[in-house]
Image (tube, rainbow, N blue to C red):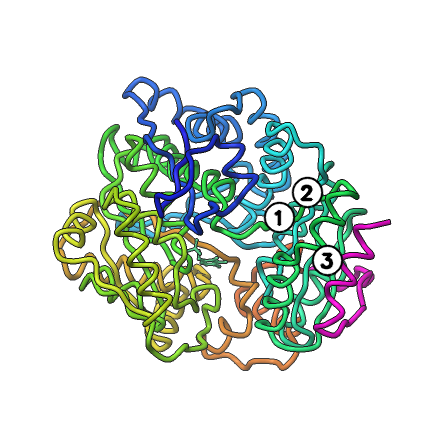
């Protein structure tokens, strides 16, 4: 198996090269040129494994050039920090509906599942490409990704990480999470400006050839940890298998019985991982793409027209506030098998913000099991209330959108297959939105909101969030936009 670009104009590369590069030189995303399939007996053996072993066994097939033993070393280290033995435990809500809690990692959000292991994959990929550079990761963040990346890369040999966030543009908790980050290889800087300023600053640093040459001499190469990297997508495939394994163990499904998954979607990485699991032989029925009122994907999967020309709405599920879902390009390529056409669509998207894939391709996506729904703010709040009042369960706003999609699909289709709704964040990460949805008073301060939600639900605040109050802030520096480059240079060139 090699990795080819979705735009069809770059040479095929190994898994290590795909991870080291992130993006293909022609601007496309790397996808496997042949999809692995587990035989029935392989699948049975796989589903009996504990999470770290299962993850290594799945990754081995999606990362040729990495041995099972090597991968097991990484998965064991990556998932040891999760606070639940199952790593991604299911929670039964009745009526053949479960949530899969992907938020038991160190930052209480699902990005930990991929970002806890990516540093090992990236450092190993650089070595496999006969490169002895230190990989320095630069991240511009509006909050969650930065912290998850910091936790993943902190003190991983052969790597360094710098995170830039907009000064005053993240929540109290997000700022505390980043400012108190431990690790000898980390740098956290607040940037005077908004998220776009931080993001543009990082892009400019990546594009700076003179700086790259200087860093090269110092033995450093810059890289990014965002979700277009194959090394971030591949680890997400495993938890679909883990969900199925838990259902089998609970005798909630018979072997081979199909299970639907509902996925709160932003950049389309999480749901695409489910599609790879399905193609690899896991009995997946529907893949329900759940959006909030930024419902560009709902429209696309219903009409075949992707149109980002619409207002950008701020919702209580900010990780789904996205108008361009970068990983959708991978699905389009897998469906069309035509880099030329994908290039044309992406060009049209860049130009007029819009493209149409045609009825034939849309039908193919529907046949493959994709269906799409969205939840308005009112609907999200309604689901949060209903799940709390009916089941005593706190579902964060992203998870609530997924639960809404599952409900809408059942109502529309009359189907009642077992359904797993992916739960992507701890409700305590969005305590204020939870309180207001549940009809409670919302304190001004983030930490007070944590305590209020805890008292309301009689559930303790998750340890990683609670512990923030007691931790000392290491990083207090605020830089101007035009000081970002020099800060990076000073940090990397001794
Ligand atoms: C990133 C994120 C999502 C969206 O996942 P994608 O892979 O980008 O589709 C959903 N919920 C939460 C809480 C997230 O952090």
Gap in Å between the C-alphas at discs 2 and 1? 6 Å
Residue found at x 72% / y 65% = 176
Gap between marks 2 and 3, in whole Å?
A: 30 Å
Judging by the rendered image, the residue that carries numbered circle 2 is 135
Neighbours of disc 2 within 10 Å: few (<14), some (14-19), many (20+): many
Q: Secondary structure at mark 2?
A: strand
Q: Position of residue 59 (x, y in %)?
A: 46, 30
* Furthest-right residue in this view: 494
Q: Is mark 1 within 8 Å of ligand 1?
A: no
Task: Magenta stretch: give its range.
Answer: 466-494
**Is 83 contained in the magenta span?**
no
Using a 10 Å C-alpha cutoff, classify the residue at mark 1 as few (fewer than 14 neighbours), some (14 to 19) or many (20 or more).
many
Indicate which disc, 2 or 3, sits on the residue closer to the N terminus. 2
**Residue wearing tag 3:** 467
Q: Position of residue 311 (x, y in %)?
A: 37, 80
Is label 2 or label 3 in front? 2
Question: SS class of the residue under badge 1?
Answer: strand
Of 214 and 391, the residue lying toward us: 214
Q: In the drawing, what numbered circle is on residue 223? A: 1
Say if mark 2 contacts mark 1, CB within 8 Å. yes
Report the residue at 17% width, 51% height from top.
361
- Residue 149 lies left or right of residue 220; in this view the side is left
Viewer-nearest residue: 232 or 274: 232
**On the rendered image, what quadrant is the N terminus found in?**
top left
Q: Is residue 78 above or below residue 297?
A: above
Q: Measured from the top left, where is residue 346 in percent x and y? A: 34, 59
Kindly state the secondary structure of the residue where label 3 is placed: helix
Q: Position of residue 140 (x, y in %)?
A: 62, 62
């Amino acid at each position: 198996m090699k990795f080819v670009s979705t735009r069809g104009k770059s040479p095929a590369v190994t898994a290590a090269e795909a991870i080291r590069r992130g993006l293909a030189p022609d601007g496309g995303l790397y996808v496997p040129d042949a999809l692995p399939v587990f035989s029935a007996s392989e699948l049975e053996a796989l589903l009996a494994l504990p999470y770290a072993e299962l993850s290594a066994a799945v990754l081995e097939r999606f990362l040729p050039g990495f041995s099972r033993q090597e991968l097991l070393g990484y998965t064991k280290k990556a998932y040891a920090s999760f606070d639940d033995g199952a790593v991604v435990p299911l929670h039964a809500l009745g009526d053949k509906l479960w949530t899969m809690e992907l938020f038991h990692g160190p930052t209480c959000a699902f990005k930990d599942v991929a970002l806890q292991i990516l540093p090992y994959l990236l450092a190993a990929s650089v070595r496999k490409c006969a490169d002895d550079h230190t990989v320095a990761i630069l991240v511009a963040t509006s909050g969650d990704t930065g912290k998850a990346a910091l936790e993943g890369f902190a003190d991983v040999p052969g790597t360094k990480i710098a995170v830039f966030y907009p000064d005053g543009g993240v929540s109290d908790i997000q700022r505390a999470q980043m400012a108190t980050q431990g690790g000898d290889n980390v740098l956290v800087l607040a940037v005077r400006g908004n998220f776009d300023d931080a993001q543009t600053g990082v892009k400019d640093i990546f594009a700076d050839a003179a700086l790259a040459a200087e860093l090269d001499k110092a033995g450093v190469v810059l890289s990014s940890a965002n979700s277009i990297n194959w090394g971030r997508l591949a680890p997400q495939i495993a938890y679909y298998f883990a969900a199925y394994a838990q259902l089998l163990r609970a005798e909630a499904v018979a072997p081979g019985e199909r299970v639907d998954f509902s996925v709160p979607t932003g950049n389309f990485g999480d749901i695409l991982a489910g599609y790879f699991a399905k193609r690899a032989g896991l009995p997946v029925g529907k893949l329900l793409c759940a959006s909030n009122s930024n419902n560009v994907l709902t429209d696309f999967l219903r009409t075949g027209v992707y149109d980002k020309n619409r207002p950008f709405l701020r919702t209580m599920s900010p990780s789904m506030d996205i108008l361009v879902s970068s990983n959708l390009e991978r699905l389009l390529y897998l469906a069309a098998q035509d880099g030329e056409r994908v290039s044309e669509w992406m060009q049209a998207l860049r130009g007029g913000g819009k493209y149409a894939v045609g009825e034939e391709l849309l039908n193919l996506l529907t046949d493959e099991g994709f269906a799409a729904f969205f939840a308005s703010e009112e609907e999200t709040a309604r689901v949060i209330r209903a799940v709390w009042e009916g089941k005593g369960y706190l579902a964060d706003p992203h998870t609530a959108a997924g639960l809404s999609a599952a409900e809408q699909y059942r109502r529309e289709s009359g189907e009642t297959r077992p359904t797993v709704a992916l739960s992507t964040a701890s409700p305590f990460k969005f305590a204020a939105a939870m309180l207001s949805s549940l009809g409670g008073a919302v304190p001004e301060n983030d930490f007070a909101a944590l305590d209020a939600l805890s008292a309301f639900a009689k559930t303790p605040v998750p340890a990683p969030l609670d512990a923030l109050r007691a931790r000392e802030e290491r990083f207090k520096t605020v830089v101007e936009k035009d000081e970002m480059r020099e800060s990076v240079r000073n940090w990397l060139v001794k």
